[in-house]
Amino acid sequence: MRWIAHLLVLAIVNFFALFVAASYISGFTVNGGVREVLLIALLLTLLNVLLKPVLTLLFGPVIVLTLGIGLILVNALVLFILDTLSKNLTIDSVLALLYGTLLIGIINWIAHLGLKPRPEV
């Protein structure tokens, strides 16, 4: 049950990250109401949980050779797949994809820091 709550929290974080990206990045557009954006956030969460580990494994040598910067490529690929799957998300350019990837990645990183279990003293 705990992992379901964790996934829901990550979906809410992705909802917020998509909203921030759509607000501040030109060429990154999320259409529809709250329900549609929440569905996009849920889809992004599922892609991050199911597809991102596979892509990270496939791009492992690139990630190692670039000292971790290749993870931006993996995150951009996940966001591109999300753009392809969703009709309510539109990313107009590669620059908008890169900025969106960085912004959503930073917001998710901060959220993961907060969700990390604390050691008991």
Image (cartoon, grey):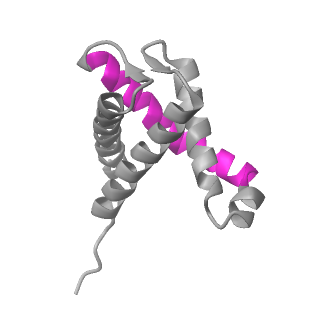
Does 111 sit left or right of 89 as displayed? left
Image quadrant in which you'd find residue 13: top left
Residue at 62%, 46% (x, y): give it: 74
Q: Give the range drawn in magenta.
A: 35-59
Q: How many marks?
A: 0
Let me know if residue 42 is in the magenta part.
yes
Residue 8, compared with residue 53, is above or below; it is above
Q: Is residue 38 highlighted in magenta?
A: yes
Residue at screen point 38% across, 32% down: 25
**Which of these two is toward me, 55 or 20?**
20
Q: Quadrant of residue 17?
A: top left
Q: Please say if 23 is above or below 103.
A: above
Main SS type for the magenta part? helix
Residue 51 on image: x %, y %: 60, 40
Coordinates of residue 101 in the picture (x, y in percent): 49, 42
Residue situated in front as seen by the camera: 51 or 17: 17
Q: Which of 79 and 51 is in front in this view?
A: 79
Q: In this view, does 63 lie above or below 7?
A: below
Q: Residue at x 29, y 29 (%)?
A: 23
In the figure, is residue 114 to the left or right of 80? left
Q: In this view, does 55 lie to the left or right of 111?
A: right
Q: Where is residue 37 in the image (x, y as percent from the top left)?
A: 33, 22
**Residue depicted at x 59% and y 31%:** 94
- Depth check, front residue: 12 or 17: 17
Residue 22, given in percent of the width and then of the height, sits at 34, 28
In which quadrant will I find the C terminus? bottom left
